[in-house]
Image: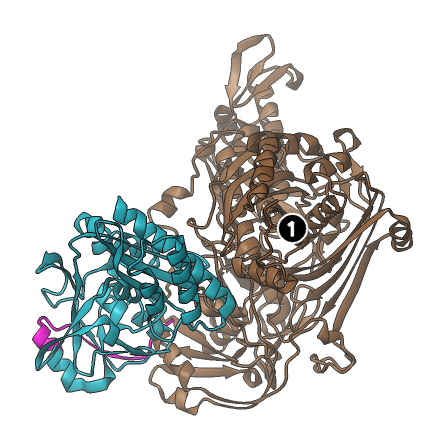
Amino acid sequence: MIPATFDYSAPSTLDEALKLLNEIGDEAKILAGGHSLIPMMKLRFAEPEHLIDLANVPGLAYVRFEDGQLKIGAMTREVDTEESAEVTERFPIFKDVAKLIADPQVRNFGTIGGNLAHGDAANDQPAVMIALGANLEITGLEGKRTVSIDEFFYGFYATAVQEGEILTEIGIPVPSGKYGNAYHKIERKVGDYATGGVAVHIELDDDGTCTKAGIGLTNVNPVPLRAERSEQALVGTKVDAEAIANAAQYASEDCNPSDDLRGDADYKRRVIKSLTKKMILKSLERANA
Amino acid sequence: MGHSMKRKEDDRFVHGKGKYVDDVKLPGMLYMDIVRSPYAYAKIKNIDASEALKIPGVLAVVTGKDLEQYNLHWMPTLMSDTQMVLPTDTVMYQAQEVAAIIATEKYIARDAREAVRVEYEVMKPVVDPYKALDEDAPVLRTDKEDKKDNHIWHWEVGQKEETEKVFNEAEVVVKEQMHIPRIHVSSIETCGCVADYNKIDNHLTMYMTTQAPHAIRTVIALVAGHVGLTEEKVRVISPDIGGGFGGKVPVYPGYVIAIAASFLIGKPVKWIEDRSENLQADSFARDYHITAEMAGTKDGKILATRMKVLADHGYTDAAANPSKFPTGMFSIGTGSYDYPTAFMEADAVYTNKPPGGVAYRCSFRVTEAVHAIERITDRFALEIDKDPAQVRFDNFIKKDQFPYHSPTGWEYDSGDYHAGLELAMKSVEYDKLREEQAEKRKKGELMGIGISTFTEIVGAGPSKDFDILGIKMFDSAEIRVHPTGKAIARFGTKSQGQGHETTYAQIIAEELGIPAKDIQVEEGDTDTAPYGLGTYASRSTPTAGAAAAIAARKLRDKARKLAAYLLEVSEDDLEWEPGKFSVKGAPEKSKTIQELVFAAYTNHPQGMEAGFEATHYYDPPNLTFPSGAYICVVDLDPDTFEIKVRRFVAIDDAGNIINPMVAQGQVHGGLTQGLAPAMYEELIYDEDGNILNGTLMDYLVPTAVESPSWETGHTVTPSPHHPIGAKGIGESPTVGAPPAIANAIVDALKPYGITHLDIPITPYKIFKALKDKGVLDKPIAE
């Protein structure tokens, strides 16, 4: 459990970090919380030559409501959304998800930005961000650009963050009407990656008709997956039993799980179906609370 | 005795001041890392260490060929088999040691590991133990000249013909094939050592994580005596240990390589396993394939049991059993029930897996036996449609039948099984639960109740039957009371978290009247402690605890003589109460134990030996037989089959309890380690012998989050032959919990017609079983 030799820099400004990143090129890796990267390095699955630690870069860790959005700095620790009453009152899904990410030690150090930028479909935040329709701010030497969560995940450990760029902020639209959201995953034991996980966000008009739905799935596809047919099955309905059953069925059909020690594809589809139903019901309950 | 004194050792541990082997740092110390095989079965064509040796700080790369020059490349196992220290030509399991790097820093050693190039010729391994016995299976132990197959030994006990007759004539016969999975102890601290050989005085000090320091010293002398490391030249020090659970009984190759390296280089060599090495290469536990059968009457009387075991030992028999017991205490598997006929047999085989078979928090294969009998008893109850609690009541050995002679030859010392189960049922409100279950089944909800009423067999053991490498399984205590009335007591056992520093002091305090706080307990240094066989198999209280009581009684006898002398009365005129002797009828005339001890050094009578010290080597007359009645309640999610353990009531009978708080702590830990194989843990290999879950990411050790709120209680049936009536508690919960949980889950699945599932029972395994049976979406609401 000893990583290969590597160099380490801890720049004190974002600009310095970007310059360093561009200078060193693809042998450099950004170190955020390190709770995915460091274990991979200790097992020598990853052997980056240079780590650029963002810990000393100011202004990357915050949660604030601004311009109709919840803005989360990329270096915000998981614990800071978990324990922010302001965030979890309006987005209880963050309480759901944080509780399921590893253990308190990991959440005290692991960052939301790192969780997304690692590009792992087994991580939990991607599905949540898909459900919430997040936008991601990516910064390079040239400046900032924003991509939608639907354009963010490319493939296994691959995201829209290009060489020389750093993910800096996550923006989540705050709905004005009635809405609710929820996340749950089935894991073999605490700290495990999901056998399957489902994030749901729904918005309702005054009659209780669903105006918007977001459903993201964890670890049942090579990249984090939006369950589009399931979303469509809810929009325009009163989220009744039939709509929920359809949404759950579609999610189980549209995911692409692989067989592993957590279960075969059939079992995982069953898990997704069950969780989709439960999370829609929980979101509905929260929306109506 | 009977007092929940806080543990004396905890001050040290809660302040982070425990001293573990990795805390040992010696001047000039070198570090060892180990190159391991990526293949389960392969010829080693070449080991090229040239690149590794170029790395500054790398001193040596040790291979089997190097050790062969000193005849140290093989070593004996505790079961009189042989095990490679380092291979000279063939690797027999994935993660086997192939070469060792000695360097000035552990970081350098780790980098050098990557630089060693090993060329292998991969061979098709034997992974399935049943296929290992096929006629065309490759013979794995080609190092043994006369070996023509992979069969290691056959063992049997009981009445073969009578059992067969009973089975042939019985009204009801049930049978299940079970696998008790290969698991790993996964203690918090991995294994390791610092081997410190001093060339000047030809003396080896071996700091190591061992549960049995004296036995290890003897083994080192047996293995390395021929190069000059005879037993008086070897000192084994076992510092604080972060959990042993049987995994720190064996001698692992790494220890021997570290000794060899230190011996050759003349400097201390530290070797500490990392987590993956510990999990992948160190001794496994269990891995018994059992065909269990029970014969009985329609109205629920058990008539006979039959068990046939196939034991997968990996490539060598490195189990840790007493010499005469290749299956350990498996023959306790007739259980807590009274019937005259039973037959058990076992065959052991070699496969391309790591060796082991350690007694993981269990008295030598008791866990496997208990699982088989408790599961098949439930299967029998299911077959005759009778409540499993009632079947147990109808068949229990009765309180007045003790000492009870079992059909496999044991003499159970004492027990009150009816009382235990009655208390457990009352605590859990059993009848109400069954009513609730009936209601839920009508609605198609899955709820299960499982019972385990087990008998353990611990405290090995009486010298007529029990030895390890010929050394009888006594254990020892030595008490020295200083002139000021404070004492030091040393033992041949070795605590790994059991709390010996507290409980042994309490035993001595009870017998001698010196406050427990004034008694310092020491273990683990072979230069100071009396010889003993160590701590495992719940043997410390039954053996060393008994030795402590008897040594203290020897001192009390001496104190009586001193009191008689000082008070000028005859010994018969004295009365003892803990802490002092007084004259009968004249209680004002008395001497405290402290005064008497002082006199032993300052004013002892002519003819009496000065000093106040005693030693005792206790050879138990019989084993002790703790028992328990456990009830588990589970709820299953009907879609995902997630399992929620709603209640778990554990009623233990360990005889007299020394420290209830320590005992309860042991039960909590043991139950969690019983939950582990029941629902989470199993080492899984693919057909090429690759371990599929060789890290803690996939080898699922449950945590506090997975653990239910354990509800504990006890009945007290003292052991009639133990000096303080104690039986041992450390392992009962690990042994008794898995079948209670398995029985509960199988009971929950009764509407689907499921009669058995192998542990670990996971949601996915339930899904698969129902799918394979074609009942996955069968409506079950009544």
Q: Nearer the viewer, residue A91 or B75?
A: A91
Q: Is residue A3 magenta?
A: yes
x, y (%) of residue B39?
55, 81
User: In the picture, residue B356 is in which quadrant?
Assistant: bottom right
Q: Is residue A218 magenta?
A: no
Taking the image as shown, residue B240 lies to the left or right of residue B213, namely left
- Residue at the spot x=25%, y=64% of the render? A129
Taking the image as shown, residue B778 lies to the left or right of residue B755, namely left
Per the rendered image, the range of residues in magenta is A1-17
Chain A on-screen colour = cyan
**Label 1 crowding class (10 Å Cα cut-off): few <14, some 14-19, many 20+?**
many
In the displayed orientation, state which residue is furthest to the top: B585
Residue located beneath label 1 in the image: B363
- Residue at the spot x=36%, y=55% of the render? A279
Chain B on-screen colour = brown
x, y (%) of residue B136?
76, 83
Q: Up-down: is A4 above or below B521?
A: below
Q: Nearer the viewer, residue A63 or A55?
A: A63
